[in-house]
Image (cartoon, grey):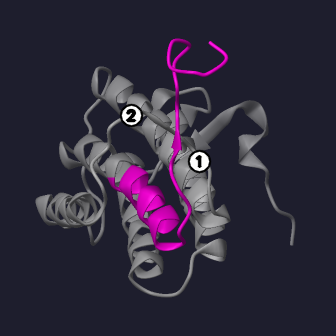
């Protein structure tokens, strides 16, 4: 069977069959969401079993749903959509992490355990996806819960990385400004 390679000319298809340029803002946002999902998969490979791993798995599933939202600008997606309940779940986790961790007094540098470092990297990809989705909202219709979900998700990932380090007994690497450093 001969397979056609439709993307060789810089075009791709959305859920509804519409052809768009691979440089389209919607495709950029979809690409970052896909990259975020892959980054979460990397984080999961070093995350200990338990609630954190279960939450990362839930995030991956919801990101596929979010991608479906983005790939379907006409709003005719089949099945699930990102909803206020998804955002509420993230808010609950965020509150739980913040209550269980020491309050932040300083900026902290990413790192620590492999799981925490991977989650922090995923957080930065999430922030980029959020920016691309917000850029897309100025050009096209996007479900109102999509950018809110990504915003909250990046906050949860930040606190999750802190929790992973805290539970492993790894101290936070505090950023010291030039005036605060002993050599400064």
Percent position (x, y) of residue 174? 50, 38
Magenta-drawn stretch contains 130: no
Q: Residue at x 50, y 20 (%)?
A: 180
* Residue marked by disc 1: 121
Q: Which of marks 1 and 2 is nearer the N terminus?
A: 2
Q: In this view, does 91 lie to the left or right of 28?
A: left
Quadrant containing the C terminus is top right
* Residue marked by disc 2: 106
Quadrant containing the N terminus is bottom right
Near mark 2 (Cα within 10 A), the count class, few <14, some 14-19 or many ≥20, is few
Is 90 or 108 nearer to us in this picture?
108
Look at the image and tell me whether residue 72 can be seen. no
Q: Residue at x 52, y 87 (%)?
A: 49
| Label 1 vs label 2, nearer the camera | 2
Q: What stretch is highlighted in magenta?
A: 156-184
Is 101 or 1 nearer to us in this picture?
101
- Secondary element under disc 1, as helix, strand or loop, is helix
Q: Residue at x 50, y 50 (%)?
A: 172
Look at the image and tell me whether residue 170 can be seen. yes
Query: Is 24 rendered above or below residue 41?
Result: above
């Amino acid at each position: 069977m001969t397979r056609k390679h439709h993307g060789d000319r810089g075009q791709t298809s959305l859920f509804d069959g519409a052809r768009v340029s691979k440089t389209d803002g919607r495709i950029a946002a979809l690409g970052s969401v896909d990259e975020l999902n892959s980054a979460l998969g990397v984080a999961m490979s070093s995350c200990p079993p338990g609630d954190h791993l279960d939450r990362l798995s839930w995030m991956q599933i919801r990101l596929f749903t979010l991608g479906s939202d983005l790939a379907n600008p006409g709003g005719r997606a089949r099945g699930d959509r990102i909803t206020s309940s998804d955002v509420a779940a993230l808010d609950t986790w965020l509150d739980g992490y913040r209550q269980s961790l020491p309050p932040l007094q300083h900026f902290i540098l990413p790192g620590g355990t492999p799981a925490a470092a991977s989650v922090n990297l995923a957080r930065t990809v999430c922030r980029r996806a959020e920016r691309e989705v917000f850029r897309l909202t100025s050009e096209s219709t996007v479900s109102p819960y999509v950018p809110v979900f990504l915003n909250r998700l990046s906050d949860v990932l930040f606190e999750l990385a802190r929790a992973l380090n805290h539970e492993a007994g790894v101290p936070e690497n505090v950023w010291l400004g030039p005036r605060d450093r002993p050599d400064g």
